[in-house]
Amino acid sequence: MLLFKELRKTAMTRINILKMLTYTSWGANSSTLKIMYKYLILSKLKYGSFLFINTKLLNLKMIETVYNAGLRLASEIFRSSSIPSLFNITQLPPPYLSNKKK
């Protein structure tokens, strides 16, 4: 449980960096934000993803909310849009599918 809390805390600080770049006066376009999302947040979440296979659903939900929040921010999608449409628009697989590929 501690691992997931630390991972969530670290990823949320990186999401805050992405938020700062999103809300600046010059702004960053969505393709740049998506690249930064992949390198800042997704790399952190994917690093130990093989450990997530045999974990509790509560821990996976904790990580999945960070994953989805970063995607929403990077693609500038409203919070009211559904999660399947989020993955469809961003052309990135959901975390549970990307872990099964390996």
Image (cartoon, rainbow, N blue to C red):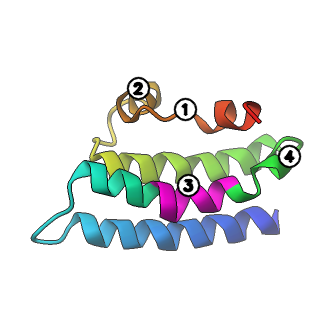
Amino acid type of the residue tagged 3 in the rendering: Leu
Q: Is residue 24 above or below residue 59?
A: below
Give the number of the mark in front: 4 or 3: 3
**Numbered range of the magenta stretch:** 38-46
For label 1, the crowd category at 10 Å Cα-Cα, with few meaning under 14, some 14 to 19 and many 20 or more, is few
Give the residue drawn at x 48%, y 54%.
38
Residue 27, percent across and down?
16, 64
Q: CA distance from mark 4 to mark 3?
A: 19 Å
Amino acid type of the residue tagged 4 in the rendering: Thr
- Contact, mark 4 vs mark 3 (Cβ under 8 Å): no
Comes first in the chain, label 1 or label 4: 4
Image quarter in which the N terminus is found? bottom right
Residue 45 located within the stretch drawn in magenta: yes
Comes first in the chain, label 1 or label 2: 2
Give the residue drawn at x 54%, y 49%.
67
**Residue 17: quarter of image:** bottom left
The residue singled out by tag 4 in the image is 55
Give the number of the mark in front: 1 or 4: 1
- Contact, mark 1 vs mark 2 (Cβ under 8 Å): no
The residue singled out by tag 3 in the image is 42
The residue singled out by tag 1 in the image is 93
Give the structural element (helix, strand or loop) at label 3: helix
Q: CA distance from mark 3 to mark 1?
A: 12 Å
Give the residue drawn at x 29%, y 49%.
31
Give the structural element (helix, strand or loop) at label 2: helix
Comes first in the chain, label 3 or label 2: 3
Q: CA distance from mark 1 to mark 4?
A: 20 Å
Q: Which mark is residue 63?
A: none
- Specify the principal SS of the magenta part: helix
Amino acid type of the residue tagged 1 in the rendering: Pro
